[in-house]
Image (spheres, rainbow, N blue to C red):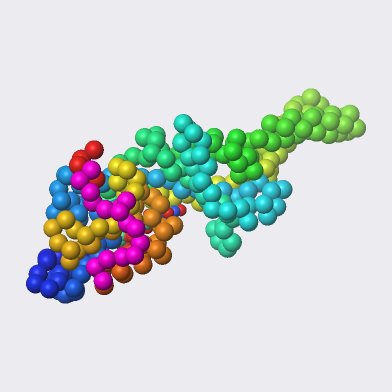
């Protein structure tokens, strides 16, 4: 869609491939809403788009199928915000989804669909691992990590000293073997016992200042419906939002209570 115009009896939409006419137009443009709605409503309509990172971790060996049946969860850490996720995904790439939901400036930077930085920084992975350490250690892994390190050290010392004694090797052989074993087993420990990050990507939240959805008729015409089921939780409700939008566009009303999502005066003021 390049533009739309309210005309007699409906709306005319111009796209790159032609001109279209309909009785009503539903604008569900996600992260593009600030620019598209903003054209008409200007700065009085405060929507903000923020960048978020999502991660998929493979649980540690030994976690079995514990993550297969967990519910879709959101974990409230009080003043430290919250994170959410889904159970193990079957099929590639697999893994348990984990992501921060809250609006901490450290984890969400304002962006546009054109300017968003799609690269995940190592510090962003560390931040989520840090939280998982205490809340979901089977994903972060570090809970058992130090125990494993100590057992590993003791085991290596014993094995190498025995070989050293038996084969009459020199001290140099002893230290070289120790270093070799340290590195290879560190690698194995990490891959076996630390939740492996198998996927990471970015997404955009289109947020209203009160974090509720926006579903309402355009303030200048009931021929246009604005629907940005936003603030990062619209997807969970897409079936009912679809029903509401079908009602509004065909009947001009809905039996669902959408008063919370309307463009009231308080929501139009810039915050
Ligand atoms: C990787 C990822 C993971 C996510 N995880 C979750 C989750 O776990 N839970 C959750 O609730 N939400 C999640 N979200 C967010 C969720 O996807 C959004 O909240 C939801 O898709 C918003 O729906 P929408 O219809 O408002 O916008 P979108 O789904 O973004 O749709 C907007 C559409 O408008 C189109 N568009 C824009 N401008 C124009 C134009 N001028 N002409 C024509 N078309 C246009 C775009 O191409 C796009 O297809 C995730 C998002 C991503 C990317």
Task: State the predominant SS element of the stretch in magenta.
Answer: loop
Instruction: Give the farthest residue toward the right.
Output: 166
Work out whether residue 88 can be spotted.
yes
What span is colored magenta in the figure? 251-266
Instruction: Give the farthest residue toward the left.
Output: 8
**Quarter residue 224 falls in:** bottom left
Count of number-bearing discs: 0
**Who is closer to the viewer here, 248 or 242?**
248
Q: Could you tell me which residue is drawn at 60 percent across and 50 percent down?
A: 58
Q: Position of residue 105 (x, y in %)?
A: 36, 35
Q: Is residue 251 above or below residue 133?
A: below
Whether residue 213 sits left or right of residue 171 in the image: it is left
Q: Position of residue 252 (x, y in %)?
A: 24, 68
Whether residue 13 sits left or right of residue 216 in the image: it is left
Q: Position of residue 161 (x, y in %)?
A: 84, 29
**Who is closer to the viewer here, 234 or 197?**
234
Q: Quadrant of the N terminus?
A: bottom left
Q: Is residue 183 above or below residue 91?
A: above
Q: Quadrant of the C terminus?
A: top left
Q: Could you tell me which residue is drawn at 12 percent across and 73 percent down?
A: 9
Q: Quadrant of ligand 1?
A: bottom left
Q: Could you tell me which residue is drawn at 28 percent across and 57 percent down?
A: 215
Is residue 252 part of the magenta span, yes or no? yes
Work out whether residue 169 can be spotted.
no
**Quarter residue 241 falls in:** bottom left
Q: Could you tell me which residue is drawn at 39 percent across and 63 percent down?
A: 240
């Amino acid at each position: 869609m390049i533009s739309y115009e309210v005309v007699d009896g409906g709306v005319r939409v111009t796209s790159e491939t032609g001109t279209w006419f309909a009785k009503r137009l539903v604008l569900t443009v996600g992260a593009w809403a600030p620019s598209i709605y903003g054209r008409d409503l200007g700065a009085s309509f405060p929507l903000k788009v923020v960048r978020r990172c999502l991660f998929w971790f493979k649980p540690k060996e030994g976690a079995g199928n514990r993550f297969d049946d967990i519910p879709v969860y959101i974990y409230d850490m009080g003043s430290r915000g919250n994170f959410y996720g889904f159970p193990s995904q079957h099929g590639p790439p697999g893994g348990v989804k984990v992501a921060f939901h809250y609006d901490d400036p450290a984890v969400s930077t304002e962006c546009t669909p054109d300017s968003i930085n799609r690269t995940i920084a190592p510090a962003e992975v560390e931040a989520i691992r840090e939280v998982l350490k205490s809340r979901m250690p089977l994903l972060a892994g570090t809970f058992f990590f130090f125990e494993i390190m100590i057992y590993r050290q003791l085991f290596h010392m014993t094995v190498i000293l025995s070989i050293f004694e038996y084969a009459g090797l020199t001290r140099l052989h002893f230290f070289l073997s120790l270093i070799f074993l340290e590195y290879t087993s560190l690698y194995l420990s990490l891959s076996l016992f630390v939740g492996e990050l198998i996927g990471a990507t970015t997404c955009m939240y289109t947020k209203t200042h009160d974090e509720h959805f926006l579903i309402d008729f355009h303030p200048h015409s009931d021929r246009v419906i604005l629907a940005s089921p936003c603030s990062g939780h619209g997807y969970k409700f897409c079936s009912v939002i679809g029903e509401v939008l079908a009602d509004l566009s065909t009947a001009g009303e809905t039996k669902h209570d959408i008063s919370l999502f309307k463009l009231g005066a308080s929501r139009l003021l810039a915050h």
